[in-house]
Amino acid sequence: MFILRKYVLYLLFVTLFISECSVTHNPRIQKVKEVLPQEFLPIGHRGTRVFAPENTMSAFRFAAKLGAGFELDTMECKSGELIVIHDYTLERTTNGKGKVSDFTLQELKQLEAGSYFIPIFQKKLSEMSIEEIRLNAKKGFLFSKKFKGNIDKMTKEEVLSLDVSNFLVSEFKGEKIPTLEEVLNEFGGKVPIDIEIKSEKSGESAIQVGTKVAKLVTEKKLENKVFITSFNPYVLEAVKQTNPNILRGQIYSSFEDAELAYYKKVILRNLYLNSKAEPDILAMGRELVNENYVKEMHSYGYKLYPWTVNDPKEMEEFIRYGVDGIISDRVDLVIDVYNKIKGSPK
């Protein structure tokens, strides 16, 4: 009975909310075309996280080498700097332990963010066919200068038996957590960058991070070279208030597995806070994408970048629907699939 009453209250709240705040659609179509003129934009998720440690300079260099854009995650550390990392804790992608927010930049720079990736890479390599290994080798994604073999004559078993020093992954040892400023200094204006703002805390803390990111982009004079995204519409509102010239992208999904109250899921996946964020770009979870959905959102003027699409068949399907780009761990495959269907991205 309690659960039913709670559910009814949620529905009542959502009904009242929607009646007060109908969905608005005001993407700046011409502005988006100026900043993102590409007919189709491949976007590397956290760089190129199959071939290099995610959210590192090496991963971003891979994406830039491919001619793709890339997505990154940024948040504040204890001393206030904006650093590039996905998790709120350090264990998964560094040799550190604890919360990112408990460490200063100086302390974070002492950590190593590359060695963890070696076993991940080896697993990914074992899942590739020998044909895919050869293709990626020719693209320069796999082998270090130490490798002297002839990949065209090697079996998969022979490749997998090689010492790790034969692979580029061995060169990532010692990789550091970058700051957002370091990334913008090297790549700003050279490739499209999707800056996703993260904040462990909601409310004013998250809004402050949004403001700080927008100020840094403004300081670097990159308003027309990057776009800022977030799941939090109030963060995007802060970006809008700080510098309205910066493109804003709303990230959302079905939120089926998210630890959110039901009414929040309804509000977020249906874009009922669009009047706050006023996004120019939509980055939706792949599960929401179908031909009719793409047509509907295009009719409002949005560019659409679904995430995280790693299956080539799904990539092909979405490209045929007409999405404007794809965010993927395998941005190299996105490019290959697009070229197969339509030719080189314009």
Image (cartoon, rainbow, N blue to C red):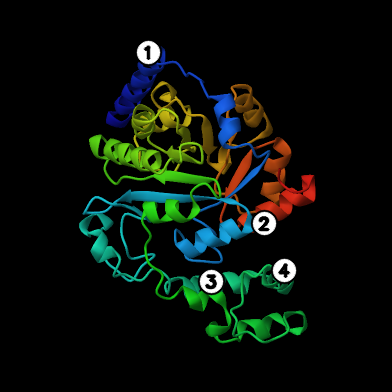
Q: Is residue 7 left or right of residue 189?
A: left
Which SS class for mark 1? helix
Q: Residue at x 70, y 36 (%)?
A: 321
Q: Please give the residue where the numbered disc 3 appears in the rendered image.
A: 121
Q: Position of residue 217 (x, y in %)?
A: 40, 41
Mark 2 against mark 1, which lies toward the viewer?
2
Q: Earlier in the sequence, mark 3 or mark 2?
A: 3
Q: Are marks 2 and 4 in contact (CB under 8 Å)?
A: no
**Amino acid type shown at disc 2:** Leu
Q: Is residue 132 above or below residue 294?
A: below
* Residue 20: mark in rendering: 1
Q: Earlier in the sequence, mark 3 or mark 1?
A: 1
Q: Please give the residue where the numbered disc 2 appears in the rendered image.
A: 333
Q: Position of residue 227 (x, y in %)?
A: 48, 39
Q: Earlier in the sequence, mark 2 or mark 1?
A: 1
Q: Is residue 99 left or right of residue 215?
A: left
Estimate how packed mark 3 is, as few (under 14), some (14 to 19) or many (20 or more) residues with alpha carbons within 10 Å: many
Q: Is residue 141 left or right of residue 280?
A: right
Q: Is residue 55 above or below residue 31?
A: below
Q: Is residue 24 above or below residue 170?
A: above
Q: Position of residue 69 (x, y in %)?
A: 57, 49
Estimate how packed mark 2 is, as few (under 14), some (14 to 19) or many (20 or more) residues with alpha carbons within 10 Å: some
Q: Please give the residue where the numbered disc 4 appears in the rendered image.
A: 135
Q: Are marks 2 and 1 in contact (CB under 8 Å)?
A: no
Quadrant where the N terminus sits is: top left
